[in-house]
Image (tube, rainbow, N blue to C red):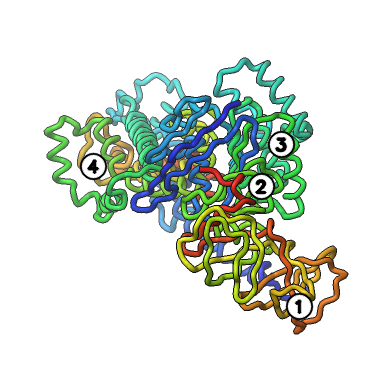
Amino acid sequence: MADIVIRNLRKEFGAFTAVQGSSFTIRDGEFFMLLGPSGCGKTTTLRMIAGLELPTSGEILMDGEDVSQRPASQRDIAMVFQMFALYPHMNVRRNISYPLVSQGLPRAQVQAKVAEVARILGITDIMDKPVGGLSGGDRQRVALGRAIVRNPKAFMMDEPLGALDAEFREHMAEELRALHDRMGATTVYVTHDQLEAMQMGDKIVVMNHGVVEQFGAPQDIYDHPATLFVADFIGSPPMNVLRFQGVAQAGDRSIAIGDVTLALPEVQQDASGRDLVLGVRPEHVTLADDAPYRGRILASEYLGTSQIITLDTAHGVVKARAPSAQGVRSGDTVGLAFRAETLSLFDAGTGRALRTAANAGVFHG
Amino acid sequence: MSAYSVTEPSRASKSIAAVLVVVYAIITLLPLLWIISTGFKSGPDSISYPPKVVFEPSLEGYVNLFTTRTRIGAEDFAALPPPETWYDEIVRQSGTVIAGPSRFGERFMNSVIIGFGSTALSIFLGTLAAYAFSRFKVPLKDDLLFFILSTRMMPPIAVAIPIYLMYRELGLSDTHLGMILLYTAVNISLAVWLLKGFIDEIPREYEEAALIDGYTRFQAFRKVVLPQAATGIASTAIFCLIFAWNEYAFAVLLTSGNAQTAPPFIPTIIGVGGQDWPAVAAGATLFLLPVMIFTILLRKHLLRGITFGAVRK
């Protein structure tokens, strides 16, 4: 097991830059998520760590050693592919033992290890079946078995749950996380599903257009998005963004939005211009009749324990998450109350969040 | 259940299809049956008019195919000891004796060596080239592929004279190696194109999984890609073999005493006193067997190979 340090990693395919200068560190034993929309460079990053693509420039350090130009076979990494890539001409047992055979392990040892892995994954009964007829879940387990059988330095997983039914995905996600906790193996996991990333990851890197937008623990990323992209990409529904003109300077503890002044955590940085964005999560918007910031209710969606109320305000549409018992009527105008420590302020010119007393600890570099 | 189903053909169309298939089979198999039966006829039966459908089977054609015979004087003939073997006996019935073996066995072996040799070489080179075209960044890939295909755009025999002169200079005329190289050169473009299609269909993830599992690129190719491409390789091999096996024009032009294959040899079987049709038919029958056996052995792959890509399994 190993720390994996990524430094200024860059990959170009001809004129197209897939990854532009990513840097982050994956600690030993972490369940690490690469999250982003399709085409953001997350899979390319994973493939560079695995050795299936060689980076154009930059370093990949494993145990302090730069492996960026080594072939995959020399990196001691295991990978689970989205479509599992089980060898179709071999049965389950041979699929799982295949990585051990390449190491030239004696047969008795191979058999013992394969049997142990089969027990861990609960697939002892399908070991002699061809992989063609297996269910999605069993294929997934076989692919996992092939990955864990040789105790690699790290696991790479490229959307491993993407090919499963929604219902089964939940179950496999739990199984995967439990397996990781049991083995303590460093895992790098690519997904475009922000819920999956939050649910399973110790750390998340959010990427967009080949750039690392934010890197941190799931809750830090959720509560304090570093960019407008992250604010919009993470959360369902996403963070509300209220666009307005105003002045924000270091030391401010409030901001004027329209004719209302809202309390903020202390701003520690000047904004570059007058175009600002206020970000607030739907669950941090409360409907209060006496609040000065007003909005008109457009609709509400019932979600069981809660409801999503859509309101029209002077600075755009806002969604609020409220208990489902709260009665609302479309067309009513109500007040929206915010708590200072839950607000984020973005500089619309740069797309980045302004550093405040609340998020200063989260931002790095 | 409705009377009409989109996926299941109706009973009427099924029987029409069956009739068509049977008629087609008869039309295509009739010449074959005629050749096979002629091979078992006696000389007079083979040229009788109207043609005999029912006849007394005879191995004369096969014996004549494998032997050369000579006619000797009536006195010498009468003085011969009684025939020692069944084929001696057959030959004597037409008033001749066996002078020695014919060259059919040798020519047949030449066909086997050249046909299977060039097929193996075409598949070997074709698979490697197709894999490279399918997986690697090859400069000018599309132009190269087109160039390879363009070698098929004229009949190979159009370059017969340059090849004849070239082979004479290189000492490849009338050699097994020369014929293997020639048939490989003709077949390789077909092999590359067919195999590239098959290899393109194999997801790269399989090889990548093998690379991650600690195998080199070549090991991944051999242990993961090749078994996956078996279908394509089998059907490509059949096409290559059929061409090399049946090729006539170059064989006539470039081979004679040493490396002559069966196709130019069979028509030269002329018996004592006129064309020996049963022997020619026997030669043709035996000539059909290797390709038939090869195709039957690989037919499972061939069927899948022909429909490959049309339907995902």
Three-letter amino acid code of the residue under disc 1: Val
> What residue sits right under mark 3 in the picture?
A129
Disc 4 or disc 2, which is closer to the eye?
2
- In space, the residues marked 3 and 1 are separated at their CA atoms by 63 Å
Give above or below for A330 relative to A118. below
User: Do we see residue B271 in this rendering?
Assistant: yes
Disc 3 or disc 4, which is closer to the eye?
3
| Co-location on one chain, circles 2 and 1 | yes
> What residue sits right under mark 4 in the picture?
B252
Three-letter amino acid code of the residue under disc 4: Val
Disc 4 element: helix
Disc 2 or disc 3, which is closer to the eye?
2
Give above or below for A179 relative to B138. above
> What residue sits right under mark 2 in the picture?
A218
At horizontal 74% and vertical 44% (from top left) the residue drawn is: A172
Left or right? Give the position of A284 relative to A269. right
Quarter of the image containing the N terminus of chain B?
Answer: bottom right
> What residue sits right under mark 1 in the picture?
A334
At horizontal 48% and vertical 30% (from top left) the residue drawn is: A61
